[in-house]
Amino acid sequence: MFSFAPRRLIIGAVGGLASLATFSYYKSNLFPTCHARSQAVRRYPPSADFPDLKKHNNVMATHLTPGIYARLRDVTTPNGCTLDGCIQTGVDNPGHPFIKTVGAVAGDEESYEVFKALFDPIIDERHNGYKPWDKHPTDLDFTKIRGGNFDAKYVHSSRVRTGRSIRGLGLPPACSRAERREVERVVVDALGKLKGTFAGKYYPLSNMTDAEQEQLITDHFLFDKPVSPLLLASGMARDWPDARGIWHNSQKNFLVWINEEDHTRVISMEKGGNMKAVFERFCTGLLQVEKLIREKGWEFMWNEHLGYVLTCPSNLGTGLRCGVHVTITKLSKDPRFNDILEAMKLQKRGTGGVDTAATGGTYDISNADRLGKSEVQLVQEVIDGVELLIQMEKRLENRRSIDDLIPPKKVTCSKVY
């Protein structure tokens, strides 16, 4: 079992020290009624309320039993989040016969503990046997990275991203307008104090000019209102675009999304194959942001079991996705391609994002794991794996065998999305 720091507001929304009255207001008014259980006695037993999951193919449906539901249906976190609020996205979205989604989200940091009877087996399946007693390593020492400067003929862009949540504030599926605005205030205040190559500007979606919007679209920075049924059913698009925005530095290679799927998404990116430089910028900028947030009395959600706590169980731990756009035209036609990726704990998708097809033999290749390995470990796995993919592609271009380069099959990486 792991513990959380108590929810606290050291800095008030108006900028001064939070008074006891302000704290009481936050505690009693910030949680939306759609995710809070009425205090009235339930008229029906849990058995009458159990969702129909017979045709569902998601991890939540696999592990939610009538017994677990009966035990947790009327339980709430200290902030009013319920089991039904956490599983609604999985109830409304049965999944696909060949794509197994997670089917649950957390409404707040405490959801993972209060509803651990469900979340623990979900995490176990999604993260390849990660147990409730396991401890997650964190390592942002970029000097440990070996290699990482890819052949630009094959690698066109490099990117590392993660998410971070502000402790003491509800997560996007269950936060109130006031909490969402407080996330924006806290993060934008910290970002505004960055210096040197990290100095930049914040663009709130609510009052973005047409010119700013067009430029962000051109730069492929802009995120739009969620349209995925998975996100809509979880409540993440409420009040759009209130308190959402994008910040980037002047070089446009360090970005922060605010109040999309998580409180923040931190991104380091650049064209070409210098993943080593991208990861160095990622670590340096992220640690600077965390330092500035701590100076104001806030901190990121983190514990030694789950690492950094984020909305979706699939992103727990590092929340890290290290990826490249790489052209491997000949290798991608090899019937062993998918097995090669799986053996190296890598995953592929089209360069347009999730559920898009590759074009011209160019794929977005990234790490499959998130939890149980450190940031340095995951980035090194991607670097080593992509180097091998490029080596194989060069062999095939010269009509040479790659049989001796095929990696041995390891424990199957997760295919839960």
Image (cartoon, helix red, strand yellow):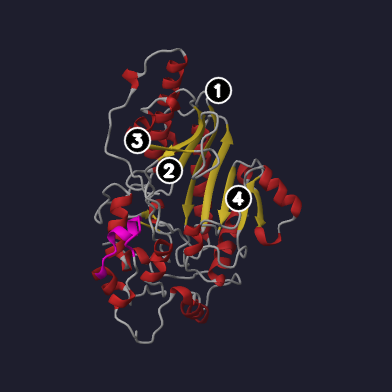
Which residue is more in the foreground, 55 or 86?
A: 55
What x and y, as percent, mark residue 94? 39, 58
Residue beneath disc 2: 140
Q: Is residue 125 above or below residue 401?
A: below
**Are dots 3 and 1 in contact, CB under 8 Å?**
no
The first of marks 1 and 2 along the sequence is 2
Residue 399 visible in the picture? yes
Q: Amino acid at mark 2?
A: Leu
Task: Identify the secondary structure beneath mark 3.
Answer: helix
Mark 3 neighbour class, 10 Å CA radius: few under 14, some 14 to 19, many 20 or more: many
What x and y, as percent, mark residue 192? 63, 55
**Are dots 3 and 4 in contact, CB under 8 Å?**
no
Image mark for residue 153: 1
The first of marks 4 and 1 along the sequence is 1
Task: Identify the secondary structure beneath mark 4.
Answer: loop
Which quarter of the figure has residue 302?
bottom left
Q: Label 4 to label 2, Cα distance in Å? A: 19 Å
The first of marks 4 and 2 along the sequence is 2
Residue beneath disc 3: 342
Q: Residue at x 56, y 39 (%)?
A: 269
What x and y, as percent, mark residue 357? 51, 38
**Residue range corresponding to the magenta coloring:** 53-66
Q: Residue at x 71, y 61 (%)?
A: 207
Which quarter of the figure has residue 16?
bottom right
Q: Which label lies toward us, 2 or 3?
A: 3
The answer to whether residue 134 is magenta is: no
Q: Is residue 273 above or below residue 28?
A: above
Q: Which label lies toward us, 3 or 1?
A: 3
Q: Label 4 to label 1, Cα distance in Å? A: 34 Å
Q: Residue at x 41, y 75 (%)?
A: 80
